Image: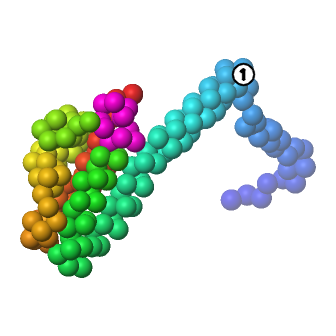
Amino acid sequence: MAAAPSGLLKDLADVSMPAPPSWAPQTAGWAVLGVLLLVAALWAGWRAWRRYRANRYRREALAELSSLEAGVDAGSDQRARALVGAAVLLKRTALAAWPREDVAALSGDGWGRFLDTHAGTASAAARALAPLVDDIEYRGAGTLSAVSASDARAFLGACRQWIAGHRVPA
C-alpha cells in the first residue's frame, strides 16, 4: 500500500457530531398524557387505600380468629369456647359489613341462608358453616366440649374462608 500524501490529510476537517436528542417531550400531547397517567395513578392509589380501610374489620376478625384457633388444642373447654367465639365472630363480622337491621335478628336457617347468599368466593365454606353455626348457637357447653379437635379446626377453617371471601355489595 502506498503512503498517503500528507497534503491531502491536512485538508481533512474533523467530523462534527450532532447534538444528542432531547429527552424532553416535544409536543403538548406528551404533557397531557403525563397528566392523565398521574391522575390515573392517584385514582388507583385512592381506591386501594379505600379498599384497605374498608377491609379493616376483615383483618381484625381474621386476627381474632387466629387467637381462637390457638385454643382448639388446649383442651375441651377451650375448644368449646373457641367454637362459640367463632360463631359470635361470624355474626360480628356480618354486622360490621351489613346494616344491623339485615343481620342482627338472623338465627337458625335464616342465618345459614345469609352466610350462603353472601359467601362470595367462600360458597363451599358457607354451605359447610350453615348447619354447624345453627348447632353451635343452641348447643350447651357440655356437648360442644365433645367436638373433636379436627372438627373444630374444620369449622374454624370454614369461618376463616367465609370471613376472607365474603362479598359486600357496593
The residue positioned 90% from the left and 49% from the top of the image is 10
Q: Which residue is mark 1?
A: 27
Which quadrant would the N terminus be assigned to in this image?
bottom right
Q: Is residue 130 left or right of residue 8?
A: left
Q: Amino acid at mark 1?
A: Thr
Q: Residue at x 52, y 38 (%)?
A: 50
Q: Position of residue 15 (x, y in %)?
A: 81, 43
Residue 96 painted magenta:
yes
Principal secondary structure, stretch drawn in magenta: helix
Left or right side of 95 for 75: left
Residue 27 appears in the figure = yes
* Image quarter of residue 108: top left
Secondary structure beneath label 1: loop
- Where's residue 72, x and y in %? 22, 72
Q: Name the spot of residue 132 as percent of width and height, x first.
A: 12, 52
Magenta span of residues: 94-104
